[in-house]
Image: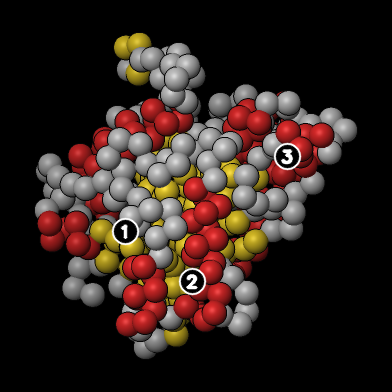
Amino acid sequence: MRVARIHLLPMASPDDVAGLLAAIEAGDIRPEGVIAVIGKTEGNGCVNDFTRAFAARAVADALAPHRKDGLPVLVMSGGTEGALSPHMLVIEQREELAAAGPALAVGAVQTAALGWQNLGRIAQVHQVAAGVRQAMVDAGIARAGDVHFVQVKCPLLTAARMAGCATPVTQDALKSMSLSRAASALGVALALGEVTADQISDAAIGTDTGLWSGRASTSAGVELDGHEIVVLGMATGWGGPLAIDHAVMADQVDIDPVRACLGRLGLGKPGQLSPAQQGRMVALLAKAEAGRSGHLRGRRHTMLDDSDISATRHARAFVGGALAGLVGHAQIYVSGGAEHQGPDGGGPVAVIARREGM
């Protein structure tokens, strides 16, 4: 039976793979079974954040000697503002004797290169939707309702890439990140039945805040030209102790849905998680967004007006702090820029936990 294992490894720098190499040497990680690696690095998360490529290259170099069938999906997200702790989640699949599921199921896909003319447009939506459906098949997840989180790494436009387009969607590299995240999120929403194809148009991408996915997490980077997609859900073909659930934050301080999600996984309690409960929580993944109104529950904030620090960086730190206060530590994955990922100003959250007694 397929069993998913997730290894949370701290990183001392973007190229720190010492923990990964030690786990491989000890036999804790079997590199041939690694499906995906999702990491947070301490870059700025903007167009010129090359820590993402640096981290991905370091992980690839560490895994390559141990693999015959190519590399797994590598998703590196820049930005650990505030007290967010740099780390990687190594997602591994094994064939083991285990109690029958449903249990955590994982599928991963790398799409073909996206033509730069298509970035931020409907063609990107459909390419991501097809990739999500393929990853669901890979995971053995038959029902969209059993998907709890979809992580997409998508490309962005640089000056050179824009120059190669007849009519790029934008001439602003930073804006291209937003549009790529937006189109990718709508691709997830389309694949999961959260929106319909007739609701999506080029004009709606990045503008219609009424269209969103409660399970999409998209992150743009300069280090790729296609999409890296990881689908996380529950399936009967998988066994083992891990389970996943999700919630949607309505705004940056809306922690009650996350608390309810923890409760469904057997981690509910007033206040912060206890040390024992923290040990059972394997991973927390979230999206963060400043929101377009410039207000949070009727009170003005300045995240959108700061010309020194991008609003996505403010949002990562702020939401990271809110969630850390709930779970008791900040070694959590918080990605900024939640276009069509949850309601405006909010965002999806997923929790992976080890079930009690397993």
User: Residue 256 at what x, y percent from top left?
Assistant: 26, 37
Who's the residue at 27% across and 36% down the image? 321
39 horizontally vs 117: left or right? left
Which mark is nearer the camera, 2 or 3? 2
358 horizontally vs 288: left or right? left
On screen, residue 206 above or below 256: above
Which kind of residue does numbered mark 1 sit on? Pro
Who's the residue at 69% across and 43% down the image? 125
Which kind of residue does numbered mark 3 sit on? Leu
Who's the residue at 35% across and 36% down the image? 81
On screen, residue 305 above or below 150: above
Q: Which mark is residue 119?
A: 3
Who's the residue at 12% across and 42% down the image? 271
> In the rendered structure, which disc, 3 or 1, sits on the residue that comes first in sequence?
1
Q: CA distance from mark 2 to mark 1?
A: 16 Å
Q: CA distance from mark 3 to mark 1?
A: 33 Å
User: Residue 135 at what x, y percent from top left?
Assistant: 60, 63
Q: Which residue is mark 2?
A: 62
Which kind of residue does numbered mark 2 sit on? Ala
* The one of 151 and 113 positioned closer to us in this rendering: 113
